[in-house]
Amino acid sequence: MSGADGRLSLPRESLKSHYEIAVIGSGYGGGVAASRLARAGRQVAVFERGREITPGEYPDSVPKMIEETQVDLPETHIGSPAALFDFRFNTDMNVIVGCGLGGTSLINANISLEPEARIFDHPHWPESLRQESRAGSLAPQFARAIAMLGAKPYPDSAPRTEKLAAIGRVAQRLGRPLQRPLINVTFQDGPNHAGIQQSACIYCGDCVAGCNHRAKNTILMNYLPDAVRHGAEVFTRMRLEFIARGGPSWKLFFRPVTGLLQPSQPAVEVTSEVVVLAAGTLGSTEILLRSRDRGLTMSDAVGSRFSGNGDMIGFSYNSEETLNAIGWGRRDGAGRRPVGPCSTGMIDLRDSPSVEDTKILVEAVLPGALAAVLPEAFAAGSKLTGIRTEHGVLNFVRSKFREFGSLLFGPYAGAIHNTVTYLVVSQDDSGGQLYLDRDRVRVAWPGAGAAPALADASELIRRATEAGSGIFVRNPVWNRFNGKQLFTGHPLGGCIMGDDAGTAVVTHKGEVFAGRTGGEVHPGLYVMDGAVVPRSLGVNPLLTITALAERSCERLVLDRGWTTSYDAARP
Ligand SMILES: Cc1cc2nc3c(=O)[nH]c(=O)nc-3n(C[C@H](O)[C@H](O)[C@H](O)COP(=O)(O)OP(=O)(O)OC[C@H]3O[C@@H](n4cnc5c(N)ncnc54)[C@H](O)[C@@H]3O)c2cc1C
Ligand code: SF4
């Protein structure tokens, strides 16, 4: 049953007081759980705090970006709690997550990469998972995830883009091959494997502001419609605050999410036999921490081993070469050179002897919705933190001309037209701690930004910038002025999986441990999202989160004597 206008979500009036299975959150973990458990013929309801925002409704200008931004600071919260871009500012580590039906898939860069097998050899993974990885038996879950997400490399038949050529030159300088990672993007018109009509990518580059062209394979395009077709009910603007045990069922206490100017609404209580927390690393940990404060017993490890996945972002600004790496936004694409999907090229540096030294470098696009503010922001930012990679007088004069060019003629000329974003995914020691302050989850991680791996990651972006004789502009918060704060879009941990409650919050299947020690679990309470991942992965995390959720669902279904189907094609 789907809602009005072909939307997936239903009006709140359709909400029942009891469900067999409640899935909280609708990103990768939530999408998998909803689809696989609905396919098992169970009565499933999905609850998402954000709105259902569909292609055509994503922000394409600065005012719309502002409207779709919420900022959570230790003292206060600015912006609508239903806004798409959800920034969490903390003292050491800042995080960005998505808020909307489909979760962070709506605003991510689409890259689907499998970690190296040795990542799963770390002692923080549960023993059974380590063994399966060694035996190669995690492969089916990764394959299922790739099939459902429709992940494929940027095709050879697609237009050549300047940013892909530029990272190719960086690869040459580093003596490495340029690779094209799998990306969750569609390159042909027609119904996809989930029966959803998609359109071919138009190469506008705006993926991280939300794809307005139905080409990005978000969870809204695959797992969620699959779940709805198999009978799942979806409710948006429903934020789970905490859970408690109530006889044979779980009691779920929701607070409906309203706009800034709307009056707050009374809490809603729903009961459910099985609860799958899939509210993301921050969301699921926050729910468990609140539930613990209200009496639910669990491991003391809840909140621990938060990781930013070793993320480091930086910019090659005002280089000598045209890079064309700013999305089109609301501008007409006619006559414009294709920018390409956000990330299409990668340099793999994961062959180091120690797993803790591995890195990948990918190129990325800044969305056109921000284009208008970029010339001034980069002109100012490069003066504060920029590092020139070429010191000749001619280069200096040319770069000044280009900077004036962007300030006078806009972001599709001059310095900004010659700017590309680079992301390095490296490793960290998962040393962050999530905790509640004034009932909101925060990250504590003193000294996180001083890790040597991050200095190496930053140096790698500087070397990439050198290839085009540009100015290396560091991540604006990772600089000498504010004590090297970090920013991540890949939060992991907080409800980590492991062998017992002494060290972990959930089992290898995602079941929540019931006590502070031992292996007893709460019946029917699961976590399936980035929160269960106990270490940095060395690659962007969506594929691992999806594959682990596939594995947890498989076990849940088997344990209960149910059956489900895994074929990606329409039944
Ligand atoms: C800009 C950006 C680019 C990225 N690019 C990539 C990439 O290229 N490749 C990659 O692998 N990863 C990428 N990521 C990260 C990736 O998208 C996330 O790791 C992934 O989405 C996490 O999946 P999840 O299921 O754990 O949580 P999410 O996808 O974040 O989903 C959690 C959902 O739960 C909802 N929720 C939260 N709290 C509650 C509550 N209390 N009640 C109800 N609902 C709640 C949220 O609104 C959200 O919809 C990127 C992230 C960002 C921000
Ligand atoms: S490049 Fe444009 S059309 Fe293609 S997936 Fe990204 S946002 Fe969609």
Image (cartoon, rainbow, N blue to C red):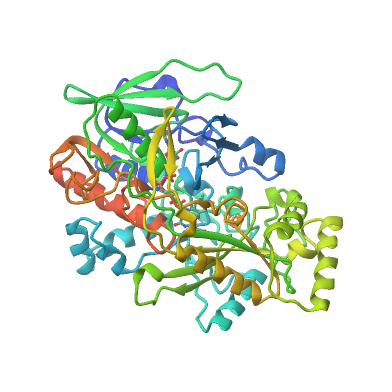
Percent of width and height locating residue 460: 55, 71
Taking depth in this image into account, of 10 and 94 the one nearest to the observer is 94
Let me know if residue 1 appears in the view: no
Seen in the picture, residue 96 relative to 19 is either above or below; the reply is below
Q: The N terminus is located in which quarter?
A: top left
Residue 269: x and y, percent? 34, 20
Position of residue 563 measured from the top left corner of the image (x, y, whole percent):
19, 46
Task: Specify whether residue 306 is in view.
Answer: yes
Is 450 located above or below residue 63 in the figure?
A: below
At 64% across and 74% down in the image, what residue appears?
Answer: 166
What number of labels is visible? Answer: 0
- In the displayed structure, 326 sits above or below 99; it is below
Residue 316 appears left or right of 22:
right
Residue in the picture at 36% in, 54% down: 430
Quarter-wise, where is residue 355 in the image?
bottom left
Query: Residue 108 or 320: which is nearer the viewer?
Result: 320
The answer to whether 129 is drawn above or below residue 166 in the figure is: above
Q: Is residue 236 left or right of residue 18?
A: right
| In this picture, residue 234 sits left or right of residue 373 | left
Query: Where does the image place residue 188, in percent across and percent down from the top left?
Result: 54, 61
Q: Work out whether residue 514 or residue 58 is closer to the camera in this orientation and state it.
A: 514
Which residue: 55% across, 52% down? 483
